[in-house]
Amino acid sequence: MASTLPDPSPDTRTMSAEETAPASRGSGGVESHGIDHIPDSERRGRPRELFSVWAAANVNYLSLVIGGALVLMGLWQALAVIVVGNLFWLLTGLLAVPGPAAGAPSEVVTRTLYGVRGNRVNNAVTGWLISVCYFALNLAAAATAAFSLVGDTGLPVNTAVKALVVVLIAALTLAISVYGHAAIVRLYLPITLALTAVFAVLAVAVLRRTDFGYVPERPLTGHALWATVLAGVALIASGPLSYTTSADFSRYLPRATPARAVAGWTAFGGFLPGVVVCGLGACAATAVDMNDPESSLQPLLPAWFRPVFLLALVLGTIALNALTAYSAGLALQAVGLRIRRQVSVLIDGTVSVSLTLYALLVSNFLDTVGDVLQLTVVLLGPSTAVYAVDIVLRRNRYDGPALADESPAGPFWFTGGVNWRGALALCLGVAASALCVDTVYTGPLATALGGVDLALPAGLVVSAAAYALLTRTGARSGRRPEHP
């Protein structure tokens, strides 16, 4: 859709080297574009491509683990929680809609929320830091499966071999991220088909042994059940909420691409495998202990299928981490570092690999990182809500060239480079969420409610309401309008 925001003149824009590069998504080489605007002449593709992009990334090891953990509340309760938690992919779909409209990644679109300078802080935390931590956790999970494969060959799984495996998996992942958007679109359809075939075999093996009447020895009831249900929904929802960068993968679509198609294919691509893989984890947990899926599932699987299954776990995690590294590279650029996207991706990978190697070979560092990431819902819920409200209020009218203007004269400089309405709404949502959380620590409201964790709904509602109210109030006050 066309925007009514002013289009800055070239002499007021901060131009990067990548903006002057003759890049093309379909050129077949390394993607040259970074956070700069994608011109209409380089837009192509169909929204249904987004399905395989998100599906391939969501058939992974951690989803099996999470699904297996939820069965403690009972199988059918766990399956209901899995469905409800994955409905948050609808928000991820909505956040992908500005991509074609702006021709810009999420890391740039969010300048409308926080201003040019405020958005640098947002990208440093929600974009880069959290992404790098997730990359390290997922890489560790993939490496664990790969260690088992190496062990099956008879090779010693010593420190040197472990380090080599981690580096090799990371190299394959970063190669996809460095080549960029076109490589992701091309590769993820066959990856999705391959993973579908593997998990179809897994589904047959698991469902044959599933106890569909399963209830735990000590069933949860009343207050304890509701506390566990809410915690489970938040755990599942943290996956789609971590993809506030979904516009990164829709920005090459033509400007006229229907918003409903972009949102629908993105949401469906995450929702379907999320429900299926988590659901299989829950079903398998009625027959075996799912604390360690790669070994626990062995009694349910044909012997020939074990190496295929382990390879699928590694492949799914590579697909997931390639998206994470791609967006983290854009986030590093949006923080203000004037480096090419390929370099930023390699920096992200180096940091993540270092964390993973330290965790696997020296210390249990990832346990600490995992605890920290349990708190990400405190930040990701409110940030998702503010972004979603902005899209609705603007009716998805974003001006890509205007968003690229980082100068004080630009339309998104606001006050001192910060949109204080967006920043305040985010802070209010985070505060409300922090008061209600019950994970690594227990907030005062969670204590008052006996351990019921309402961090997710509290953060979403407060930040969304605050942003809508502050924006409407600012528009009525006669100040420079933030929404066309």
Image (cartoon, grey):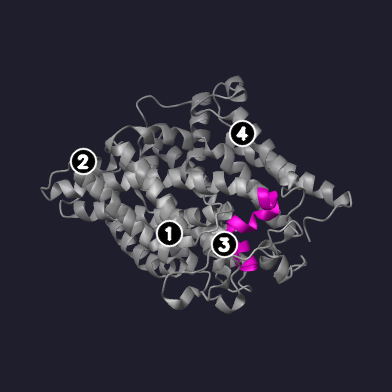
For discs 3 and 1, the disc positioned in front in the rendered view: 3
Query: Residue beneath label 2, please?
Result: 159
**Front-most of residues 359 and 45:** 359
Query: Residue beneath label 4, please?
Result: 433
**Front-most of residues 119 and 221:** 119
What secondary structure is marked by label 4? helix
State left or right for residue 221 relative to residue 311: right
Quarter placement of the N terminus: bottom right
Residue 229 lies, with reference to residue 294, above or below; the image says above
Amino acid, disc 4: Ser
Amino acid, disc 3: Ile
Query: Residue beneath label 3, please?
Result: 35
Q: Residue at x 63, y 36 (%)?
A: 430
Residue 171, given in percent of the width and then of the height, sits at 32, 57
The disc placed on residue 37 is none
Q: Sequence-wise, which precedes: disc 1 or disc 2?
A: 1
Query: Residue beneath label 1, please?
Result: 55
CA distance separating discs 1 and 2: 33 Å
The residue sitting at the left extreme is 154
Q: Sequence-wise, which precedes: disc 3 or disc 4?
A: 3
Amino acid, disc 2: Thr
For discs 2 and 4, the disc positioned in front in the rendered view: 2
Q: Sequence-wise, which precedes: disc 2 or disc 3?
A: 3
Mark 3: few/some/many CA within 10 Å (<14, 14-19, 20+): many
**Image quarter of residue 36:** bottom right
Residue 235, given in percent of the width and then of the height, sits at 48, 39
Residue 480 lies, with reference to residue 239, above or below; the image says below
CA distance separating discs 1 and 4: 30 Å
Residue 424 visible, this angle: yes
Q: Sequence-wise, which precedes: disc 2 or disc 4?
A: 2
Q: Which residues are magenta?
A: 96-117
